[in-house]
Amino acid sequence: MEDYSKYVPNVIFEQIPIKNLVSSQDYQRNLSMKHVRKAVENFDLYQINPVKVSRRDGINYVFNGQHTIEIVARVSGSRDTPVWCMVYNDLYYEHEADIFANQMKYTKALSPYEIFVANIEAGNDKQLLIKELVESFGLQISSKKQIGTICAVSTIENIYDKYGLQNLTRVLSLTIGTWEGDVNSFSANMLSAMARLIFTYDTEIIDEVFKEKLGERSIKEITRSAHERSNGSLGFAESILCFYNKKMKNPLNILKLHNTRGRIEPSSIDPNEEAAESITDYMYGKDNPPENDKSEEQQSASTTSIPQESTTHST
């Protein structure tokens, strides 16, 4: 029989009380209390991994898992709480440091898309709601940039978390209505800029005017203008706003983009969202389903009155 022992770590598994573990070796990073607090607030027993321990001279040195033991200690309220440990008896200090330094060297981190798909398979509400919303506009969440897809998964989730479902819905509706599904309009910077504009100005932005004026500007033109202004999504937001304001009788104040402290951000999910069974319910209400498969945007367009001076085209 072939010997496979060289492929199996020479360890024993033990439950060791946290008070009997020693961490904070010089080669380790400092404890991030922010990370510890966040993990405590979202504690999940099934996310706890075994702690790697090197037993030298009868002392249990933690060389991987110092955050884990602090999280468990805080959640349980006691350092008498035991944690599962993989105990190595044949390591020396320098070897521990080398393992710590290279433990992630050949580990492939999950992409935002892979995490999103896993959350869908797990049936998690946020990702299911986002997926249903995106698909209601005839689009798909994807890992590949192509027509009919959105790849900026973490950006979509961030907009949902920061501004809520209602603002995310308007971001997608206005983006699609303006640039007609141009794949470049779904970049992280563009979507973040649209969210920032919508949150900052809310009803001051008239959707039909926005679509008419910005629809005349290509994403390439907006991108070029954004790079001349500011880094990241702020430059895109400023550029879009300037094109929107052009020839407007009452232009929106661009300084508001830099100061939203006075605004109260909506919670991720408000009571209406919790009551909604689907995106259709959320967008139209359970008692008011869409007629003739019209979108909310198309229905509102027929009843929205646009001031004459606001429809002037930019040149």
Image: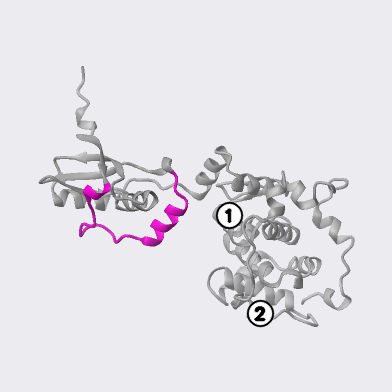
Q: Which residues are the magenta region?
A: 18-44
Extreme residue toward the top, this view: 1
Q: CA distance from mark 1 to mark 2?
A: 26 Å
Label 1 environment density (alpha carbons within 10 Å; few <14, some 14–19, many ≥20): some
Lateral position of residue 272 relative to residue 22, left or right: right
Which of 60 and 158 lies nearest the eye of the viewer? 60
Q: Earlier in the sequence, mark 1 or mark 2?
A: 1
Above or below 141: residue 121: above
In this view, the mark in front (1 or 2): 1
Quarter of the view holding residue 230: bottom right
Q: Secondary structure at mark 1?
A: helix
Quarter of the picture containing the N terminus is top left
Residue at which label 1 appears: 157
Q: Residue at x 73, y 68 (%)?
A: 214
The percent position of residue 50, horizontal first and vertical second, equals 31, 41
Lateral position of residue 273 relative to residue 110, left or right: right
Residue at which label 2 appears: 254
Does the magenta segment cover residue 41? Answer: yes
The percent position of residue 173, horizontal first and vertical second, equals 73, 57
Quarter of the view holding residue 158: bottom right
The percent position of residue 62, horizontal first and vertical second, equals 23, 49
Label 2 environment density (alpha carbons within 10 Å; few <14, some 14–19, many ≥20): some
Does the magenta segment cover residue 312? Answer: no
Quarter of the view holding residue 259: bottom right
Lateral position of residue 129 relative to residue 210, left or right: left
Specify the color scheme: one colour
What residue type is disc 2 on? Ile
The percent position of residue 66, horizontal first and vertical second, equals 29, 52
Above or below 240: residue 62: above
Residue 20 appears in the rendering: yes
What residue type is disc 1 on? Glu
